[in-house]
Image (cartoon, rainbow, N blue to C red):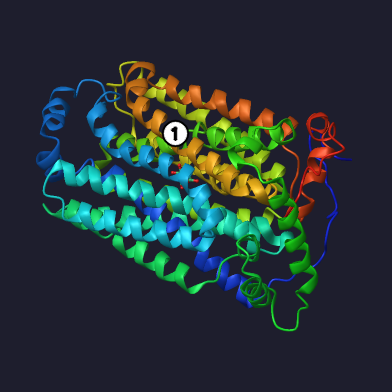
Amino acid sequence: MAPVGGFAVIGAGSDFKGKITVSVLITCIVAASSGLIFGYDIGISGGVTTMVPFLQKFFPSILRKAAEAKTNMYCVYDSQVLTSFTSSLYIAGLAASLVASRLAATLGRKNTMVLGGCTFLVGAAINGGAANIAMLILGRILLGFGVGFTNQATPVYLSEVAPPRWRGAFNTGFQFFIGIGVVAANCINYGTAKHSWGWRLSLGLAIVPAAIMTIGALLISDTPSSLVERGKLAQAKKSLAKVRGKGTDVEPELADLIKSCEIAKAANQEPFVTIFERQYRPHLVMAVAIPFFQQVTGINIIAFYAPVLFQSVGFGSDSALIASIILGVVNLGSILVSTFVVDRYGRRFLFILGGIQMFVCQVAVACVLEATTGVSGTKHISKSYAILVLVLMCIYAAGFGWSWGPLSWLIPSEIFPMKIRPTGQSISVAVNLATTFVLSQTFLTMLCHFKFGTFLFYAGWIAVMTIFVTFFLPETKGIPLDSMYTVWEQHWYWCRFVQKQPSQNLYDGN
Ligand code: BGC
């Protein structure tokens, strides 16, 4: 029987494009490597902003404040100036992601990725050579533009190129590369932290992942949908033949894409207007809710807090970094689990499993901290309790890694019809970055005031999102993009939005 809110719809549309070929595999791995730059930045900035020579050069007042604030472990790192430095990337990324939808439609997904990589590369070079705070901020803004462009274009690229039956698996590649970027950055920080110029190397080395993904993006061809959309039919046919493999008759698929595109073009409406139509309400709600919920799982907070916690319980700065590397590796392994499970058991299964797991861990961490450090946070946790917290955080990171991590990129990229797909993904990336910004800006103050209660705050959100998914997210596994409308039509709640306008062609396009 179909679960509440989810319907296992058997692929209603075309059944071509089913095979995994070597070409589609390589193309998608290369495209997914765009996640490296986002991951590298997430991993590097937390570490760099705790490096004393970096703070001495750019934020000396923070060092003075940190020296005075040793009384409560929850408040040591509470500094708005520093968080606003980190967050400047998110604001720039937010702006770029909105522009990116137009770029992805006119220049194509591939070129948007190349542009993102180049912008990030320039930003990294400026940051590595920064002589003053203006250079630092300029560099971060460029990094933000880079992330905004690539995070918008890559998930769409992957969903459009992957064989529908394995779309979930291919799409998890993006989160996997984000994870690799995070772990690589943590290791680099570990090595550079001991040197006075270490921060420069950490920031400057961001050119490496940027160069890798830019060269990669230059080598792959754009998605057949995007090429058709831009009237490049001969290229679209070539691209299709390449990803579907030798000997495959790509004509039927191409014809379908052309038909979808013509209908979409006939509507000739501004996508940012179209997306607000009632018939696209379910899609829009998901494009906003999914990335918002991803952030209020508290993932970035846990990632940030793990080394701080371990340092403040006397593990020393090396062990703190090792703790975050352990978390990162667990996260990577769990993304791979997602890759193998997401197209077999579905997105909902993983969302619900991961949700329950993360909820239990957050509550348990809050309880352990309450019992061991008290409200003042001044009591030291014993080593065994600190290990318990690390284990709980690992279970939490695994839960995130096979659910909200990869799936928050997958869902928005697969639910929209072609004409508003880039727009939907843009909104989703913008919400992701905006929420990250607000949370990182408020987290330290919140931690300082709510203490261990902060973890209960996130646990509450995890409960809400798990219930939301159970009732409102339809199962999308295996459905070709051009048949995706069926999942809404058959949904107990969303059907009222999509079925009421039979005269219109609601889902015109792959
Ligand atoms: C999230 C980031 C997070 C990262 C962790 C991404 O999917 O959007 O905010 O830091 O996963 O690996």
Q: Tell which of 449 and 105 is nearer to you.
A: 105
Q: Is residue 195 above or below residue 114?
A: above
Question: Which residue is at the far bottom?
Answer: 247
Left or right: 477 with respect to 88? right
Q: Is residue 456 above or below residue 244?
A: above
> Residue at (31%, 38%) from the top-left corner?
88
Q: Quadrant of residue 197?
A: bottom left
Quadrant position of the C terminus in the picture: bottom right
| Residue 322, percent from left and from top | 33, 50
> Residue at (18%, 54%) from the top-left corner?
200
| Residue 479, percent from left and from top | 77, 53
Residue 182 in view here: no
Count neighbours of disc 1 (C-alpha within 10 A) and say few if under 14, some if 14 to 19, many if 20 or more: many
Q: Which residue is mark 1?
A: 434
Tell how many labels: 1
Quadrant position of the N terminus in the picture: top right
Q: Tell which of 116 and 261 is nearer to you.
A: 261
Left or right: 255 with respect to 396? right
Q: Amino acid at mark 1?
A: Ala
| Residue 486, percent from left and from top | 82, 45
> Residue at (71%, 57%) from the top-left corner?
261
